[in-house]
Amino acid sequence: MGVVTTLEVQKRNKERVNVYLDGEYAFSLTLLEAVKLRKGQTLTESEIAALRGEDEIVRAVDRAARFLSFRPRSIAEVQRNLSQHDTPEPVIELAIERLRLMGYLDDEAFARYWLENRTTFKPMGPMALRYELRQKGIADSVINAVLEAVDADDSAYRAAHAKALRMRGLSRQAFKNKLGSFLQRRGFNYGTSRDVIEQLIQELAAENPDFFSESDDAEEMEE
């Protein structure tokens, strides 16, 4: 049992209220929850436990919201972040569900955001994208669905083009080897890499006949 002795709006967050029972701080609540209480009200142990539980969930949701403010996150990323701050597992589950209902967490939307970001700033192949999304905790069914929209040939060309322009002076064979290794690291398969490299060789040679060295022994430029 406990008697509500003080309801005090927090100085730093006017949307939260500190609740004192029997003259001692007990927990904090949102304004919407706090208006249900009054000074002198007696709370049972079960009511106190429920209110403290709600306080924990709201704190977890607020922490997750701050984490999400920097960029979209997967559900697994938010779970790991809350775990690192010693949030109890039952509280994490309830906070995650609340965030999903609020529209802040959606693994398919996150996966599409991740692919669009990579496509724009760092084109990668399906293998590398699949690996990254798995690291983010995205289910294979979701990964398979979003990867259907990936144009591997276009991504490989854009990834390779800027790199290729810095390889002037290499022999064609050295150019193939270095660019092929680069595309492999970006997660593109052999067939896609081969076709893109051949296309770039033809384009660069047509634009500048002196782009490639005639000697296979020419010193290779640093990547």
Image: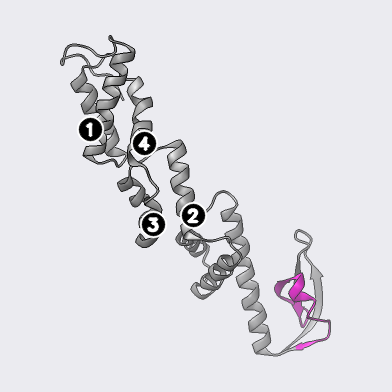
Q: Earlier in the sequence, mark 4 or mark 2?
A: 2
Residue 124 drawn above or below residue 69: above
Question: Which residue position holds label 1?
Answer: 194
Q: Earlier in the sequence, mark 2 or mark 3?
A: 2
Image location (x, y in percent) of residue 117: 47, 43
Q: Farthest residue in the right direction?
A: 39
Question: Which residue position holds label 2?
Answer: 110
Question: Which residue position holds label 4?
Answer: 154
**Corner quadrant of residue 43:** bottom right
Residue at 29% across, 33% down: 182
Image location (x, y in percent) of residue 69: 60, 52
Residue type at tag 1: Arg
Distance Cα–Cα, label 3 vs label 4? 19 Å
The stretch in magenta equals 20-42
Circles 1 and 3, Cβ within 8 Å, touching? The answer is no
Disc 2 element = helix
Quarter of the image for the C terminus: give it. top left
Density class for disc 1 (Cα within 10 Å; few <14, some 14-19, many ≥20) is: some
